Image (tube, rainbow, N blue to C red):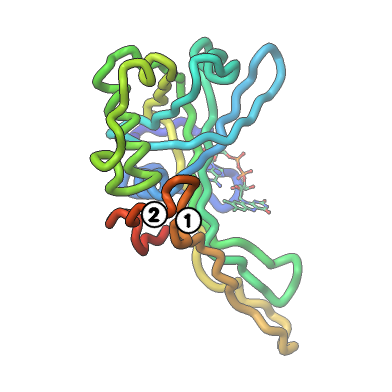
Amino acid sequence: MKDQPPRTTPSRYPKRAHHDAATIYPILDEALFCTMSFVWEGRVRSIPQSIVRVGDAVYFHASVGSHFFRSLAQLDEVCITVMLADDIVVAKTAFEHSINYRSVVVWGKPEVIEDHDEKYAAFKELTEKMVPGSWDYLIPMTDKEMAKTLAIKVPLTEASAKIRQGPPSPHESEREVWTGLIPIKPLRGAAVAGPGAEGIELPLHLRGRRVE
Ligand SMILES: Cc1cc2nc3c(=O)[nH]c(=O)nc-3n(C[C@H](O)[C@H](O)[C@H](O)COP(=O)(O)OP(=O)(O)OC[C@H]3O[C@@H](n4cnc5c(N)ncnc54)[C@H](O)[C@@H]3O)c2cc1C
């Protein structure tokens, strides 16, 4: 990700920006979801999606009947954003309130994955990301299911991360006003059995996992 073009440099707080894989990839790996934006027939579209990174690309899946996904295959460029919000930053003034966050913006050309093995691997990685340890426990994926699904990848050649962490900025007023952080980290709750699964022992991989 060297020689970043200027469009991946924020005009506000550029020192908070990073362009290295060592910063960007862990954020992409922690985020379960993203927003994908693009222009289609002259109009801006923005769609929430599940996302998984495998190597130097991010992968997406949808039904072959999805208008959204079929549009993607014809585009020269999409913009993908993920954000992990860590804390609400409570400052002395409303003006200085902020968010501690880690976010990524990716620009790239979507490519339809035709290769069976790459598509299969992307399914596996996404499933393992959503429910770690589950792939080998599940009923194996069939060729029919594969055929019903379109998989798209966007290479990670042009991307930026931006990170804000830490307490509120100091304020010159000596007036006593409480300041600090309100953590907002997401948690995975205890698994709830679906219809027909009430009597089935909860598999090991579903016990006590949290989103860190
Ligand atoms: C949870 C959350 C809440 C936020 N709340 C606010 C808010 O209320 N007000 C506010 O002004 N800003 C907020 N931000 C920051 C916001 O995302 C932008 O960084 C900010 O608006 C400055 O944009 P800019 O004009 O510098 O970006 P631009 O100059 O338009 O951006 C140029 C390029 O910089 C990179 N870039 C910019 N922002 C980010 C980012 N967040 N992550 C990764 N790459 C980035 C992208 O590659 C982008 O194409 C928030 C961010 C997060 C994650």
10 relative to 71, above or below: below
Label placed on residue 199: 2
Determine whether the residue tagged by mark 2 lies in a helix, strand or loop.
loop
Name the quadrant containing residue 167. Answer: bottom right
Provide residue 41's location: percent of width, then percent of height: 68, 12
> Is residue 57 visible in the rendered structure shown here?
yes
Would residue 51 be found to the left or right of residue 11 on screen? left
54 relative to 198, above or below: above
The residue positioned 39% from the left and 54% from the top of the image is 199
> Amino acid under label 2?
Gly
Q: Which residue is mark 1?
A: 192
Q: Residues within 10 Å of mark 2 (few under 14, many from 20)?
A: few
The residue positioned 40% from the left and 42% from the top of the image is 19
> Amino acid under label 1?
Val
Q: Looking at the image, is mark 2 or mark 1 nearer the viewer?
A: 2
110 relative to 137, above or below: above
The residue positioned 43% from the left and 16% from the top of the image is 148
Provide residue 114's location: percent of width, then percent of height: 33, 12
Total labels drawn: 2
